[in-house]
Image (tube, rainbow, N blue to C red):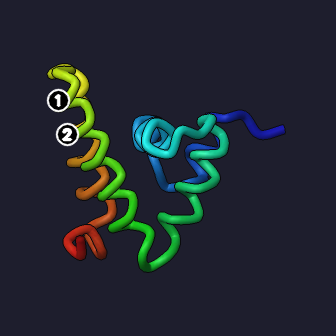
Amino acid sequence: MLTYEDCVELSDLTEEEVEAIAQHERLPEMAALEMGSYLVHTPAGIPMIKRIILDDIEEARRHGYAQKVLQLKLVLKHFVDTHPSNAAKI
């Protein structure tokens, strides 16, 4: 049987990236993992995930959550670094 962590490893995403998708889409983490895994493997998906993380950063900034903003910026940097082929197309 696969664990959640196994599924994350198979998705080409990190747990933090999945959490950002879950927060943005208001989904349970497993549903966000499925969505993210699908998106990251489609041509339009990488820019879409980048936009989701950017939206989460802006939301945290609006609410004054400075620590969350910093954490999400690290998530975004890692995502862009590990998915460079389409990352600039937003």
Which label was assigned to residue 51? none
- What residue is drawn where x is 66% and y is 40%? 30
Q: What's the residue type where badge 1 is placed?
A: Leu
Q: Quadrant of residue 59?
A: top left
State whether residue 74 is above or below residue 46: above
| Residue 84 locus on image (x, y percent) | 26, 68
How many residues crowd around disc 2 within 10 Å: few (fewer than 14), some, or many (20 or more)?
some
Q: Is residue 74 left or right of residue 3?
A: left
Q: What's the residue type where badge 2 is placed?
A: Lys
Which label was assigned to residue 70? 1
State whether residue 72 is above or below residue 83: above
How many residues crowd around disc 1 within 10 Å: few (fewer than 14), some, or many (20 or more)?
some
Q: Quadrant of the C terminus?
A: bottom left
Query: Could you tell me which secondary element the residue under label 2 belongs to?
Result: helix
Q: Quadrant of the N terminus?
A: top right
| Residue 47 locus on image (x, y percent) | 33, 67
Front-most of residues 70 and 63: 63
User: Of all residues shown, which one is farthest toward the bottom?
Assistant: 43
Whole-angstrom CA distance, mark 2 to mark 1, is 5 Å
Q: Quadrant of residue 60?
A: top left
Q: Is residue 39 left or right of residue 61?
A: right
State whether residue 74 is above or below residue 12: above
Which label was assigned to residue 73? 2
- What residue is drawn where x is 17% and y is 31%? 61
Q: Are marks 2 and 1 in contact (CB under 8 Å)?
A: yes
